Image (tube, grey):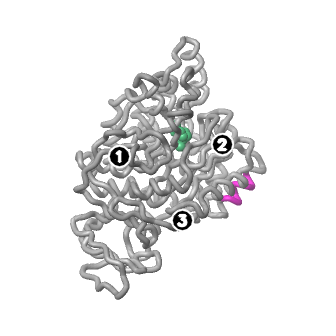
Amino acid sequence: MPLLIQNGRIVTASDAYTADIYCEDETITRIGRNLPAPPGAALIDAAGKYVFPGFIDPHVHIYLPFMGTYAKDTYESASRAALVGGTTTLIEMACPARNDEPLAAFELWKSKANGNSFCDFTFHMGATRYDSLAESQLKEIVAAGISSFKVFLAYKGAFGVDDAELFQVMRLAKSLGVIVTAHCENADAIALRQKELLAAGKTGPEWHEPSRPESVEALGVNHLSRFAAMHDTHCYIVHTSCEPAVREALEARARGAHVWIETLIQYLTLDKTYAELGDFQGSKFVMSPPLRDKRNQPFLWHNLANGNISTVATDHAPFDFKGQKEMGREDFTKIPNGIPSLEDRISVLYTAGVKSGKIDLHRFVDCASAQAARLFGLYPRKGTIQAGSDADLVIFDPNYRGVITAETQHMAVDYNPFEGMPIEGRAETVTVRGQVAVRNGNFVATEHRGRFLQREPNHF
Ligand code: URP
Ligand code: ZN
Ligand code: ZN
């Protein structure tokens, strides 16, 4: 059924104006003042509300075998949580183990999503090994519609690549026109520090951050960006947590490297004192790179506001406190790494960023939607509001007031890292390609309409 959204304040990365939006056959077909309502069209009154392009989370984990367990969400629960929070497109990290074949892994990750997702999705393909088989299969995967790889410098033995592999992934990516997303931490330094801390009896979650300090991340960013520069490859540093790491990336960019920076909503609003909470509660806040000293936050916000940091993602990686985080009670290196946050990114970013005056509305849309669409080959199908774009729209109520709690969340995990945080503003109505999936904050979709988004390489 066609949909007419009336009198909303349309805000994109570049424009703000009041108009109606008409959606037919999954796309936006007209934008203008006082558009006639065709017979049979559904009407939504958006007066007093913002209308944003559907938000894109460019870094999530849904199917994730990791550290002896599996992340908790399925596409069913994750896409529901995403939509309730205003996120209409997911870019998941497909993370095969080193002895898995890339093509089989790609099919496996896709099979978890196909037919089970309420919103659209695509993948960054993990390049977790490099040999002739991996090379030919990665080429096939790009031909099948993937235009970004993922490499890990950390997690040696699980996903991490060595320097010879990194060199070849960068060379292949350049030849295919693919951007390489990267987890940047020096794995050897981490392994040695972990060993020393454990030997000294420092076993609690509060020692996770000291085991992988800011310098370890900065070193990783330097390493990665120099390998990328050798081949002139475009790269994207995921989950950048601190000033030294951002500075390394900016210095690489100043040298002429094609480097983009992602930070996370967790780093902007939480800090390492959360991982120091007693009674093992700190384990809920163990992720890598770790939550940092609060002094980093003004620097991150400043560089987000000026566009040096392109995107705000979640790195959603949900592990229950009971039974999963608890695996590391005697040894922090065994705590599954990850902080769930998919559902709350937009409300928290709006509250902590826009309402507090740290970023303006355009930067909000840019860093949470448009930039990811541009960098990963989805723009202007996603990431903006214009005729021809997919009708993924968020009607956002800036006057909503609420408090985040796990009791009402849709993520399939037993805690919420933002528990008790007051929020100002939320996604009230959300559409997926022209059909309402969330109404008045309630999930109402009944069909798994989410589609795999094929992307073209060489879109820079
Ligand atoms: O702690 C994290 N970030 N867990 C998910 C895996 C990763 O490194 O992205
Ligand atoms: Zn990572
Ligand atoms: Zn991740």
Name the residue tied to disc 1: 304
Is ligand 2 within 8 Å of the beta carbon of the residue shown at mark 2? no
Name the residue tied to disc 3: 448
Q: At label 1, which amino acid type do we have?
A: Leu
- Where residue 380 appears, as percent x and y from the top left, is 44, 68
- Where residue 126 appears, as percent x and y from the top left, is 63, 48
- Where residue 382 appears, as percent x and y from the top left, is 45, 65
The residue carrying pointer 1 sits among few (fewer than 14), some (14 to 19) or many (20 or more) residues within 10 Å by Cα, namely many
Mark 2 or mark 3, which is nearer the start of the sequence? 2
Secondary structure type for disc 1: helix
Mark 3 or mark 1, which is nearer the start of the sequence? 1
Q: 275 above or below 360?
A: above
Q: Is residue 136 magenta?
A: yes
Secondary structure type for disc 2: helix
The residue shown at (40%, 38%) is 417
Mark 1 or mark 2, which is nearer the start of the sequence? 2
- Where residue 7 appears, as percent x and y from the top left, is 24, 73
Query: Residue 436 occupies which quadrant of the picture?
Result: bottom left
Can the viewer see residue 306? no
Q: 215 above or below 180?
A: above
Name the residue tied to disc 2: 167
Q: Which residues are magenta?
A: 135-141
Q: CA distance from mark 2 to mark 1?
A: 30 Å
